[in-house]
Image (tube, rainbow, N blue to C red):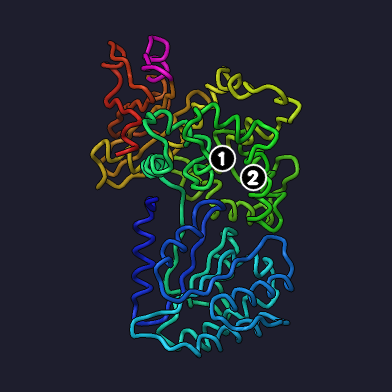
Amino acid sequence: MNFIGREEELAILEEEFTASHSSFVAVYGRRRIGKTELINHFLADKPITFSVTGAYDVKLKSHLENFSNKLSLAFGCEEQTFKSWNKAFQALQREIEKLKLSSNDKISVFIDELPWLAEMKDNGFKGALSLFWNDFASKRDDIFLVVCGSATSWIIKHIIDDHGSLANRITAQIHLEVFSLKETKAFLEEQGHKGLSSKSIMDYYMVFGGVAHYLKLLKPKLSFVQNIQKLFFEKNGLLRTEYNRLFRTLFKNYKTHELIVEHLVASWGGETLNELGKKKGLSKGGVLSEALKELELSNLITREYKYKQIKREVVYRVSDAFIYFFNRWVKKSSQVDFLGNKNYFQNIYKSQGFKSWSGYAFENVCHLHIVNIKKALGIEGVSTRSYYWRNEHAQIDILLERADDVVNIIECKYYNEAFTIDKKYAKELENKELQFQKTTGYKGSIQMLMLTSQGLKENAYSQAIISHDLEIDLFFV
């Protein structure tokens, strides 16, 4: 099976592996996104690899026993009993020193889920790792050390931005992000999904985002509705418990993070720090600010600035598709709700509530693919900034401010058929432009764009108001 995407990341790994010095690479990103698959794919044809993986909520003794076992498998030595991480890394160093390498060969050391090995605290792992690198590996030219972790904020704080013994030791870093829509299409096709329409792929993306592991669970012979029913709304649905595991494995004090997300999901327009600080269970302060930072680093939420207020209020919004879908449709459902009802999700899918949710979810996907929108408009080289804009009288889905004295007001509509602008909606569009001008005092050119799932039906209103009619196919080019 072909490996999809990740060309830039593979190029970074190749550059580091072939460098004339030892390399220390940190890879981080959201749980289930494909970090381990990326590293294993790269190392598949490499001659010597020592690999060890941390496990969630496992104590030091078990981690050290596993390290000993992996050491034995990699180097053929007898298993040993280690009392500390220092002793474990010293044993690894001794086994490496015994090797006789050909010229240009490197020894790969892959430490997966590093925060779990360290138990997300100071259990001696970090100090032992720094001694291994500083006193041994960095003084050679044949070590390729890769560390990886889903607990993004921990990796950044304790490895990449460390101010102690690992300060400035990283030679390269890779922040692995979700697949784009184009990559998602290629991935699904490689998994055996044939003939999927652009809208079908978008439906899946609005539920799973571009998270490789979730997409891998989809059955090619099942429809979108059937796949969602099977994964979320059956007694043994594989993703019914994923939400809880996601927060518990990413954050040490996860309850604050869950509560923040719960409040943000309820407000599509987002919340400021001050607004969140007034919510039940939250209070403005260091704990809230740190949790928001960790959620943002993990790509679960995004921060957006209000138009022309870059140094003032920041609005936080949920950007992770899976979290948005789960909170709205799965979190409050129980087995009693769907026990014996094979059509549970089909009823949701046909509801007006789901249609409304789809509109917001589609808008979120569009925000994440601004680069594609710019390409479709032929303005890739123009500096831009995008916003979610609103006042008490109007709301704009995407406001694209351009450095060429133009602002694009982009309306996102997700329908099962071509969208028609009628007289009432035409007045709404005109009011959006008017409100934006009155509120901001903008004097440049304004272009109204429609971005739809099934196209825009041309009529007198569309001709008079819309400058560009874009369809979702632009995301797959």
Give the extent of the magenta segment: 416-429
How packed mark 2 is, by other alpha carbons closer than 10 Å (few <14, some 14-19, many 20 or more), is: some
Residue at x 48%, y 74% (from the top left corner): 49
Q: Quadrant of residue 427?
A: top left
Question: Can residue 277 be seen from the camera position used here?
Answer: no
Which residue type does callout 2 highlight?
Glu
| Nearest to the observer: residue 100 or residue 173 | 100
Residue at x 33%, y 19% (from the top left corner): 456
Number of the front mark, 2 or 1:
2
Residue 224 on image: x %, y %: 50, 29
Split into 4 quadrants, where in the image is the C terminus?
Answer: top left
In primary-sequence order, the first of circles 2 and 1 is 2
| Nearest to the observer: residue 360 or residue 427 | 360
Specify whether 35 is left or right of 429: right
Question: Can residue 207 be seen from the camera position used here?
Answer: yes
Specify whether 302 is left or right of 265: left
Label 2 SS: helix
Q: In this figure, what is the number of numbered marks?
A: 2
Residue at x 48%, y 34% (from the top left corner): 204
| Nearest to the observer: residue 158 or residue 34 | 34
Which residue type does callout 1 highlight?
Phe
Quick check: 313 above or below 396?
below
Label 1 SS: helix
**Any magenta on residue 170?**
no
Checking the image for residue 242, the label placed there is 2
- In the rendered structure, are the residues bearing label 2 and label 1 in contact, judged by CB atoms less than 8 Å apart? yes
Checking the image for residue 322, the label placed there is 1
Specify whether 84 is left or right of 205: right
**Any magenta on residue 417?**
yes
